[in-house]
Amino acid sequence: MVCLIHAGDPFAQAMPRAMCRLSRLCLAHVRNKFSAGREMKCPVTVSPMKLLDGDETGPPEGGAMCFIGVTTGASLSNRLFPYWTRALGVAGPCRLVGIDLPLGASPQAFRQVVVDLRGVPDIRGALVTSHKISLLDASRDLFDRIDDTSAQSGEVGCITVRGGRLTALALDPLTSALAMDQFVPPAHWARHLGSRVLCFGAGGAGTAIGLGLATRTTSANVPSHFLIVDRVQTRVDHAVRVIREAVQTNGSAMTVEGCVVRVPSDCDALVDALSPRSLVINATGMGKDTAGSPVTASVRFPDHGLVWDLNYRGERLFLQYAQSADQSLGLVVVDGWDYFAVSWTEHLARIYGMALSPDLRRKIVAGTIRP
């Protein structure tokens, strides 16, 4: 069952208190109706374990998981959720609850969602997509624990609920690195020392990718240069500061810079200046959450370069531009499907308290078939 809270309509935006009441009513509906309908049961249980966030867990008992985003009803996670929970071995009935908040929602709206997570007994946690930074900024004081990566990056992508205690986690540096390993050849950066990374979007996703590269255990196999670009100066400043701190802490050789660019043609120029075999990333949300692309149709991607659009659905003009140039430039072009599968698998494992080995992760991701 998927229950959507549509907070983007004019009435909800004008009436934040009404929206908060709607949130409580929706989550209460999940609690009251949880046992109704067909249950998704899995017979496998695991021994008690300790998650990386320090929360003690017992055998998995199912429960409701919230999905906080912008257009959660359109996500294929609603269709794949039963497969993921079965593959992880979650026992008992499971439900996915979509909570839609518009980009730029009020701090009060984010705070009320977090309060609701604590107040409903059946909620095991939440995955946060487009609101990672805004939600933590608005509700930092409502969490009982914030893990080191979440505190460092200033974002929350995963919330676990254990006995009424809320823990904020940032898993994207890990999951982005795992997803990148799906298409970046082994030792790519070490073999091509001049290759760089250009990341459009200095929000939570772009910052996480930079952190994932900066904290790699093999410090030699990182790009020589990481440039993160956004339309907003404060976002660029935050991302650069956070990633540089990680670079210094881990002794990475990666140089980190930021740039404010507001015109797509200027973004084209940044791409054109890249050396061969560089990586270009669209982490802006453009093509899914908002229309358009950070670059124009005239962009020239680097020879034998890597192009990664984090979106797996939507119009994805950025992806289309790269695919049209694929044959002539020898590009490796990927969308966000593997990232989507890796991220959801990792988040569900943390939220439901399941052990996730590398082999099991690979098996689940391989079995996440695109419709």
Image (tube, grey):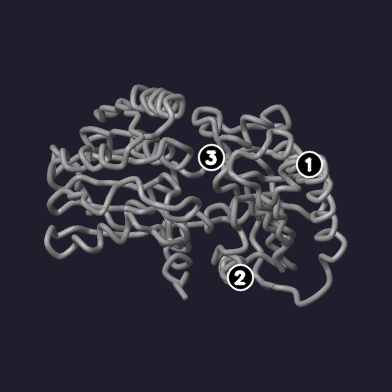
Q: Mark 3 points at which residue?
A: 170
Q: Secondary structure under badge 1? A: loop
Question: How busy is the neighbourhood of tag 1: few (under 14 within 10 Å), some, or many (20 plus)?
Answer: few
In terms of depth relative to the viewer, which is nearer, 50 or 306? 306
The residue sitting at 73% across, 62% down in the picture is 3
Q: Secondary structure under badge 3? A: loop
Q: Secondary structure under badge 2? A: helix
Outermost residue toward the right in this view: 32
Whether residue 51 is visible to the viewer of this picture, yes or no, is: no
Which percent across, then down, holds residue 201? 40, 39
Amino acid type for the residue under numbered disc 2: Arg
Amino acid type for the residue under numbered disc 3: Ala
Please name which of the two marks, 1 or 2, marks the residue nearer to the observer. Answer: 1
Q: Name the residue under label 1.
A: 15
Question: How busy is the neighbourhood of tag 3: few (under 14 within 10 Å), some, or many (20 plus)?
Answer: many
* Quarter-of-image position of residue 37: bottom right
The residue sitting at 62% across, 70% down in the picture is 82
Q: What number is the disc on residue 86?
A: 2
In terms of depth relative to the viewer, which is nearer, 353 or 9? 9
> Which badge, 3 or 1, is on the more N-terminal residue?
1
The residue sitting at 14% across, 60% down in the picture is 330
* Residue 172 placement, left or right of 187: right
